[in-house]
Image (cartoon, rainbow, N blue to C red):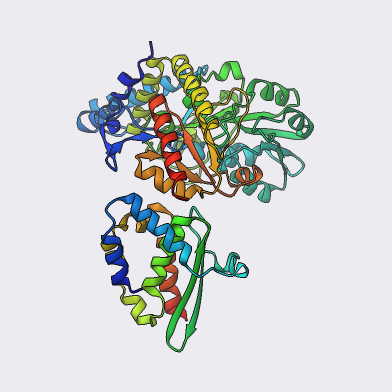
Amino acid sequence: MYDVNKIREDFPIFALSINGKPNTFLDSAASAQKPKIVIDKMNDMYLHEYANVHRGSYLLSEEITSAFEQARATVQKFVNASSSSEIVFTRSATESINLVAASWGHKFLKASDEVLISEAEHHANLVPWQVLRDEIGFKLNICRVNDDGSFDMEDFRKKLSSKTKLVAITGMSNVLGTIFPLKEIINLAHAKGAKVLVDACQLAVHQKIDVKDLDCDFLAFSGHKTYGPTGIGVLYGKYELLDSMPPYQCGGDMVDTVTYEHTTFDIPPARFEAGTPAIVEAIGLAEALKYLMSLGQDNITTHENELTAYAIKQFSQIKGLHQIGTAQGKGGVFSFVVDGIHPQDLAFILDKEGVAVRVGHHCAAPLVKRMGYSSVARASLGLYNTKEDIDILVKAINKAKTFF
Amino acid sequence: MTIDELIENFSFLDTWEDKYRYLIELGEKMPPLPESYKTAPWQVKGCQSQVWLVPSKEEDRLHFLGDSDAAIVKGLISIVLLIYDNKSPSEIKAVAVDDIFAKIGLKEHLSPSRRNGLEAMVAKIRQYADIL
């Protein structure tokens, strides 16, 4: 039984009122709130167990190294990777994607190749490929989404060719809420010999991830969206791929032997973790992932799907509200505009009612433009949201309408 | 209207609802910015709505026209222009804009994280005061 009111008590921030109103947090797609166990775990590490990892031959360093590597094993379990050596800790999902672009991209992409992304990519999975394209000269193709936000499989098939060396694609759009048919995309891409990078920033929050079942080559997600701390991200890569890649940054903790003349590099994942990593953040992330697994990711998905259906129904009853992204089976991300109200004005009024939503282009400016807007409001769900949150949002939108 | 009159008008408004309604009204009363100015050179960046600011100089005094596609932001712009319009560059530099917004009860709108363009607009006005 998924008791959302009890689960909310795990998140200290919801005890806080906002502008004298209940804290109606509907911006988890930007960053999720943290359960107390994550905060406590990180505090505890600093208070009682802190030292650097992979260096000291003393008790504290050995203990924290073991906790850090256990955190890696937790991530491995979370995405169902074959080995914890396939898990690279990064600073963010953005860095994970940049790592693949800089390391794998530089080594394996040539001017005659093609990279295929979708219209629904946020800037983190668009800009690194544009920059690399300008450097290497490959062709960057962009496959379409339909007007309802669903994935245009026909266009994808058309743009996928034997020249395509990489498909870099989101699992779930941060603007439209569309869940992309990853297995089909990956099967088709592999049939043409392309590698596939999945941007799972949104997907990992809402659904169970299984990299073995997906058979993706790379997968990136961030800590702070999955109820963990900021400053930590994950890159999953198939081991043989990671092993074929050169280092991304250089420094300590990623070398095998170093002389003044020459250096040989460590094996993955250490090869990609130069310098002191975000130790406590990695351990905090593992705590968040354990929390998600203990709630049961299928239970979270069921709860959020119910809320999503409820929200879509409630929104459809607001006159003048237009939902952007109405694909079948979409997740809990709702972009919308209301006739006669600028999204920025709407957000000012919602804020006064204690409702947090995001406005603007959501770091996916070309997508928002493709859907016909320059700025939209977005409400997004987390595992702690309730029907009451949706009701408060709807009431606040209706109140905003009386201002204009 | 002077800035003191504006502060007094706001002091009669007890709720945020009334303050926001008055802001929207102030925006509606602002002289319209000709469409020809709603272009990239006059756009103030760093905003979640579109904001435009057009300066001019008459003798030693600066004048500003402004606009936004968002109604509350437009009201906030009208206050900024009331504060800065028809002042010399040195007067512009001397304005304690934070204090004025605090007195009006809208201080939160000047915070950099709000990204509603107000802070960027004030910076731009001060920049124009330097170069014009």
Residue A76, x across and y down, in percent = 46, 20
B30 lies above or below A28: below
Q: Is residue B102 visible?
A: no
Q: Residue furthest bottom?
A: B59
Q: Is residue B10 left or right of residue A71?
A: left
Residue A118, x across and y down, in percent = 66, 36
Residue B8, x across and y down, in percent = 27, 66
Q: Quadrant of residue A41?
A: top left
Q: Quadrant of residue B101?
A: bottom left
Q: Is residue B65 visible?
A: yes
Going 50% across and 39% down the picture, which residue do you hit? A378
Q: Is residue B77 left or right of residue A58?
A: right
* Front residue (pair A65, A256): A65
Going 50% across and 17% down the picture, which residue do you hit? A80
* Front residue (pair A18, A227): A18
B57 lies above or below A319: below
Residue B67, x across and y down, in percent = 51, 64
* Front residue (pair A222, A392): A392
Q: Residue furthest top?
A: A1
What is the total number of numbered labels drawn onto the structure image?
Answer: 0
B37 lies above or below A232: below
Where, quadrant-wise, is the N terminus of chain A in this rendering? top left
* Front residue (pair B103, B57): B103
